[in-house]
């Protein structure tokens, strides 16, 4: 509610960067603990990549959220969108960080980590809906439709982008598996 009274783009970006940092550290700890990636330089680079994806991806999602909310009748701007997105990342980022530390606890660490992640993802999702409702001065149904359209189109975009990327790489005549991760 305080953020609604005095929206501040800088505070939203700082909150998003903090969430990105927590998720990056969680990624580094999880990769290190799993032993799947033995090279520490690759693990560190993965953490940096995750941080950048969360920061810039969060800002892009903020723009898309603002676009959808405004089309559906909400009153607000990119600062309102960034605030809603950044605050919705707070609980899940902390949950992922705690869960990555819990993975070091023998036997029950994984189970407790699952519970922490489940709770914090639920809190983050609820925060996003409430953030859209409050920041864009809409009712809860409009907030639900806004978030549903946003998430649905992001999933569809990822699917279509992957399909198009696969088709364009196939057109290059590269055998499958030539490029890392593809």
Image: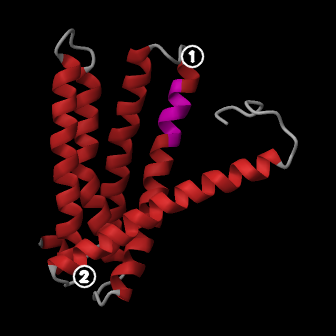
x, y percent for residue 138 = 20, 84
Residue 48 included in the magenta stretch of the image: yes
x, y percent for residue 62 = 39, 68
Whether residue 182 is visible, yes or no, is yes
Name the dominant secondary structure of the magenta segment. Answer: helix
On screen, 38 above or below 182? above
- Residue at (69%, 31%) from the top-left corner? 180
x, y percent for residue 94 = 23, 41
Find the magenta span and give its range. Answer: 43-49
Label whose residue precedes the other's in the sequence (1 or 2):
1
| Classed neighbour count for the residue bearing mark 2: other residues with Cα under 10 Å, few (<14), some (14–19), many (≥20) | many
Q: Quadrant of residue 149?
A: bottom left
- Circle 1 SS class: loop
On screen, 99 above or below 38? below
For the residues marked 1 and 2, what is the alpha-carbon distance in whole angstroms?
Answer: 45 Å
x, y percent for residue 78 = 38, 77
Q: Quadrant of residue 126?
A: bottom left
Whether residue 11 is visible, yes or no, is no
Give the quarter of the figure containing the N terminus: bottom left
Q: Dot 1 corresponds to which residue?
A: 39
- Residue at (70%, 48%) from the top-left corner? 166
Q: Dot 2 corresponds to which residue?
A: 136
């Amino acid at each position: 509610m305080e953020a609604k009274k005095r929206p501040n783009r800088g505070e939203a970006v700082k909150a998003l960067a903090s969430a990105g940092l927590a998720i990056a550290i969680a990624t580094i700890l999880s990769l290190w603990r799993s032993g799947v990636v033995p090279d520490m330089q690759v693990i560190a680079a993965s953490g940096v990549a995750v941080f950048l994806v969360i920061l810039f991806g969060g800002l892009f999602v903020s723009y898309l959220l603002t676009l959808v909310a405004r089309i559906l009748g909400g009153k607000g701007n990119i600062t309102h969108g960034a605030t809603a997105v950044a605050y919705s990342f707070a609980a899940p980022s902390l949950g992922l960080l705690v869960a990555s530390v819990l993975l070091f606890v023998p036997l029950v660490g994984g189970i407790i980590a699952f519970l922490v992640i489940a709770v914090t993802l639920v809190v983050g999702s609820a925060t996003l809906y409430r953030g859209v409702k409050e920041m864009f001065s809409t009712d809860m149904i409009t907030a639900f439709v806004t978030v549903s359209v946003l998430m649905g189109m992001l999933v569809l975009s990822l699917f279509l982008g992957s399909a198009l990327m696969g088709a364009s790489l196939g057109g290059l005549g590269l055998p499958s598996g030539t490029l890392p991760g593809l």
